[in-house]
Image: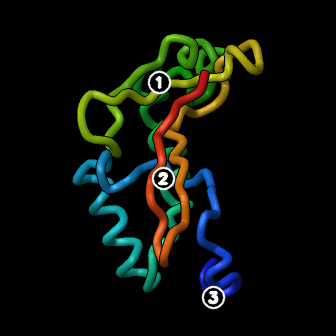
Amino acid sequence: MIEEGAGEAANGFISVGGASTPEIASDYMKDFVAKYTEMFGEYNDESNTKVYALEYILQTLKADPKGLTDIAAFKTAIDSFAAPNPYMKGDAKLSYVGTTSFGQKRQLSVPLVVNEYKDGAFQTLFVATVD
């Protein structure tokens, strides 16, 4: 879509998006991408960040089921929560962040993938995390 609108001027466009690159995506994530593509005809890499939300909620409730009806219990679980990240290869963890910016953990930690558009495709420049 960017190439259709900007043509060659799109080269060098830098964006933050996705939450996974082919290099770090687990087989589980690759299956998600394949199913999404099958259902909708093409893949939108912004979906990578959205896939995390439900997983975080379910895993946080698994850590403390009282959080289902008690928001204070849910917030307490957030502070020490960590679970395996099924969307990335290796030993990556799901965790909440935000202490540095907001003084409390209330944000979902997803990899920040910085891409550059070049000659018809996005190329990963680097993957970062925040707190």
Q: What residue does disc 2 label?
A: 51
Q: Amino acid at mark 3?
A: Glu
The dot on residue 65 is 1
**In the foreground, 29 or 128:** 128
The dot on residue 4 is 3
Q: Point out the tag, 3 or 2, that comes first from the N-terminus.
A: 3
The spot of residue 99 in percent (x, y) is 68, 15
What residue is at 64 percent from the left and 85 percent from the top? Answer: 7
Q: Amino acid at mark 1?
A: Pro
Q: Secondary structure at mark 2?
A: helix
The answer to whether 82 appears left or right of 105 in the picture is: left
| Quadrant hosting residue 55 | top left
What residue is at 34 percent from the left and 30 percent from the top? Answer: 92
Query: 10 Å neighbourhood of mark 1: few (<14), some, or many (≥20)?
Result: some
User: Distance between the Cα atoms at labels 2 and 1?
Assistant: 21 Å
The spot of residue 94 in percent (x, y) is 43, 30
Q: Point out the tag, 1 or 3, that comes first from the N-terminus.
A: 3
Q: Secondary structure at mark 3?
A: helix
What residue is at 27 percent from the left and 28 percent from the top? Answer: 91
**In the foreground, 24 or 26:** 24
